Image (spheres, grey):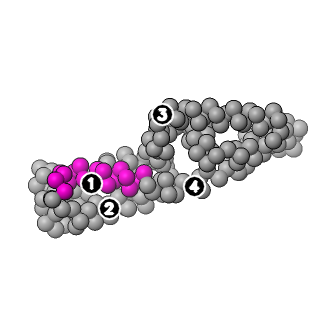
């Protein structure tokens, strides 16, 4: 079994199936690292996404051209990073459609006055969230619901760190205004 990565890559590019399997195993951490940037490890979609990553590598072996003047590892790393980032961007729209079922209610006695008030407050918050711009909704969702740090939100949404902070502050002000004014 060859151990030199350059030899494995060269043999994989030449169509050696055993080396391709070895290469896929060697690149497995890269695939999962990129998946876990956007999805939780327990998310059922992660295994499907891993398979997509393996297919991307195999297709890249066929499409790679040394004339690109870039090492295959760098080439595939960039392809994987952008594949998962774009996949997340294209499929996240449904995640931001907030509704009452997303919020776990802890109290078993759902008919108490406190619970009715809490439910109404949640409904009001969700209605007010829908009044925000799409970008503001995404930032609020990623920050408060997914609990991602601002730096990660900046990377996911491909906007500057300071812009994320500014948009988050503006969104919070709008939500407060909506709540106070009832608009």
The mark nearer the N terminus, 3 or 1, is 1
In the rendered structure, does residue 76 fall within the stretch colored magenta? yes
121 on left or right of 141? right
**Is any atom of residue 109 visible in this view?**
no
Q: Which is more foreground, mark 3 or mark 1?
A: 3
Crowding at mark 4 (Cα within 10 Å: few <14, some 14-19, many 20+): few
SS state under label 1:
helix
Is 53 positioned to the left or the right of 143 in the image? left
| Residue 103 quadrant | top right
Label located before the other in sequence (2 or 3): 2
Residue where numbered disc 4 is placed: 93
Q: Residue at x 77, y 38 (%)?
A: 178
Identify which residue is drawn at 49% across, 45% down. 157
- Front-most of 169 and 102? 169
- Figure quadrant of residue 52: bottom left
Packing grade of label 3 (10 A; few <14, some 14-19, many >=20) is some
Between residue 59 and residue 65, name the one nearer to us: 65
Label 1: how many Cα within 10 Å (few below 14, some 14–19, many 20+): some
Residue 182 x/y as whole percent? 83, 39
- The spot of residue 161 in percent (x, y) is 48, 34
Mark seen at residue 161: 3
Q: Which residues are magenta?
A: 68-85
Mark 2–mark 4 CB contact (< 8 Å): no
Q: How far apart are labels 2 and 1 at the CA level?
A: 9 Å
Residues marked 2 and 1 touching at CB (< 8 Å)? yes
Q: What secondary structure is found at the residue carrying circle 4?
A: helix
Q: Nearer the viewer, mark 4 or mark 3?
A: 3
Q: Are the residues flagged by discs 4 and 3 in contact, CB closer than 8 Å?
A: no
The local secondary structure at tag 3 comes to helix
Q: Which residue is mark 1?
A: 76
Front one among 152 and 116: 152
Q: Which secondary structure type mostly characterizes the magenta part of the structure? A: helix
């Amino acid at each position: 079994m060859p151990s030199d990565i350059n030899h494995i890559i060269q043999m994989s590019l030449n169509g050696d199936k055993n080396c391709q399997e070895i290469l896929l195993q060697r690149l497995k951490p890269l695939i999962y690292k990129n998946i876990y940037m956007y999805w939780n490890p327990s998310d059922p979609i992660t295994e499907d996404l891993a398979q997509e990553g393996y297919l991307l590598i195999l297709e890249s072996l066929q499409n790679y051209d040394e004339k690109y003047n870039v090492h295959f590892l760098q080439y595939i790393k960039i392809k994987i990073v952008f594949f998962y980032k774009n996949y997340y961007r294209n499929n996240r729209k449904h995640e931001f459609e907030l509704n009452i079922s997303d919020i776990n209610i802890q109290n078993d006695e759902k008919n108490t006055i406190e619970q009715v008030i809490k439910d109404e407050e949640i409904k009001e918050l969700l209605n007010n969230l829908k009044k925000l711009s799409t970008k503001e909704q995404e930032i609020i969702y990623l920050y408060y619901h997914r609990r991602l740090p601002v730096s990660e939100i900046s990377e996911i949404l491909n906007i500057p760190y300071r812009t994320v902070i500014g948009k988050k502050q503006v969104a919070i002000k709008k939500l407060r205004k909506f709540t106070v004014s009832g608009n």
